[in-house]
Image: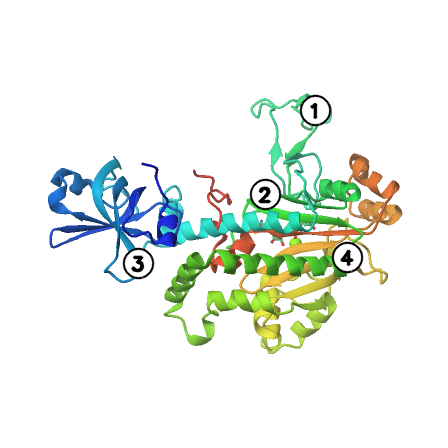
Amino acid sequence: MKRIKIKEILKKEAAGQEVLVKGWVRTKRISKNVSFIALNDGSTIRNLQVVADVNDFEEALLKEINTGASLAVTGTLMESSGSGQEVELTAKKIELLGPADPDKYPIQPKKHSLEFLRENAHLRFRTNTFSAIFRIRHAMAYAIHDYFNRKGFYYLHTPIITGSDAEGAGQMFRVTTLDMDNLPRTEENKVDYSGDFFGRPTNLTVSGQLEGELGALALGEIYTFGPTFRAENSNTTRHLAEFWMIEPEMAFYDLTDNMDLAEDFLKFLIRYALENCMDDLLFLAGRLKEEEKGKPQDQQSMDLIEKLKFVAENDFVRLTYTEAIDILKNSNHYKKKKFQFPVEWGVDLQSEHERYLVEKHFKKPVILINYPLEIKAFYMKQNDDGKTVAAMDVLFPQIGEIIGGSQREENYDKLLSRMKEMHIPDEEMWWYMDTRRFGTVVHSGFGLGFERFILFITGMGNIRDVIAFPRTPRNAEF
Ligand code: 4AD
Ligand code: MG
């Protein structure tokens, strides 16, 4: 008999049918000579209830059916008398595939803390919370490709090992095959990379943007979706050393076109989740409610589903950095000295400022544009005021910055002078500069942090819980 997934069974409600299911035991309880086994196979958050008459099975077998064990069950689907499910499976044959010693199996049928589950990341997929998160993560990755494919964007695979620092921030992981215990030296006693694998220093990429621009300036509209790496020592709930980024890059788009695309893209993804992941979202919404029960009313967040609908259905607020600084300076929050970091024209906004604007002031997602030139990357389009660049950050509730992007400087001379000012080695970036020398055009793009977006969709609070195996400072287990 061919195995059928639990999701299919629950969708079709085919009572009377004979089926074979395989999965892992979530719980087991015995009452009046009947054993009730909740079986989950990962295809849905919902379990299939397996009903086994204890007289029909060996006691030794029934004893081995514990939380975490894997089973193959053949039986007949029956209309369920219990509440919460349409069908249950009356077992005829149960095969124990892999036992799980109840004294040693870490994931017990009780509430585990997220910290505990992070330490058991290899098994945490077996909980409702994490299976829901990773099913949603999959659906969002699929929806991203669907969105861009429909719009005629090409998926470009930009390199993971690079010789350039796209963001110019210098927070990169070196890639080398040199012998660390015996490094070759130049006459000036610097490390000699000429004998290294690539014959030059290389790093893991912080962004696929620069190569993405090369693609866009021929293919028109491209996007990248890959891992990016940042060696910043940030131990926050929003930073990873290895995270995934989606970076669309579009020829002939100015900053307004860029904002329009970012807003439409985010709303499409949220709608996709609402249309395709409702079972998992409802579970996570319930989980969030439970977690916030103890908090005072004004600190509780909006219901997850309501929040997603709200963001999908309302226009984002758009304003300049300068206007945002004015709002922050005139706020009671500022006057009462409640911000930890300074608010002054020219400073980089901190997440406390971003969240104030989104959660307290506008109560909507915000797109901030035209940031001071000094705090942004070299490639951003210089505005006529000589002080700002055509940058855009999209700010979301609970998260702060979820997207960073800009119109790009397409003028060769302006770009070169900015690179010199910022000590970016322009000779090494001759290939990037060439796009401004030959057939340059207005173009724009942005980067969406995939995990930050998954935090928003799932309502989770820590970025370590929305990537399968998080990489953070001093942490690369699994
Ligand atoms: O603002 P960032 O640094 O922009 C870029 O890298 C541009 N090259 C993007 C572009 O224009 N093509 O990063 C973009 C987004 C941020 O808004 C944030 O969501 C996410 O990437 N991000 C991180 N996510 C998790 N951990 C980190 N350490 C992150 N750093 C950035
Ligand atoms: Mg940024």
Image depth: mark 2 or mark 3 in front: 3
The alpha-carbon separation of the residues under discs 2 and 3 comes to 48 Å
Label 3 vs 4, first from the N-terminus: 3
- Circle 3 SS class: loop
Please name the residue that numbered disc 1 is placed on. Answer: 199
Tell whether 111 sits left or right of 221.
left
Please name the residue that numbered disc 2 is placed on. Answer: 231
- Please tell me how crowded label 1 is: few (under 14), some (14-19), or many (20+) other residues with Cα within 10 Å: few
The alpha-carbon separation of the residues under discs 3 and 4 comes to 59 Å
Label 2 vs 3, first from the N-terminus: 3
The alpha-carbon separation of the residues under discs 1 and 2 comes to 23 Å
Q: Quadrant of residue 1?
A: top left
Q: Is mark 1 within 8 Å of ligand 1?
A: no
Which residue is located at x 74 percent, y 61 percent? 371
What's the residue type where badge 4 is placed? Leu
- Circle 2 SS class: loop
Q: Position of residue 284 (x, y in %)?
A: 42, 59
Label 1 vs 4, first from the N-terminus: 1
- Please tell me how crowded label 3 is: few (under 14), some (14-19), or many (20+) other residues with Cα within 10 Å: some
The alpha-carbon separation of the residues under discs 3 and 1 comes to 63 Å
Label 2 vs 4, first from the N-terminus: 2
Please name the residue that numbered disc 3 is placed on. Answer: 85
Label 3 vs 1, first from the N-terminus: 3
Please name the residue that numbered disc 4 is placed on. Answer: 373
**On screen, residue 374 above or below 41:** below
- Viewer-closest of 376 and 228: 228
Q: Position of residue 306 (x, y in %)?
A: 50, 69
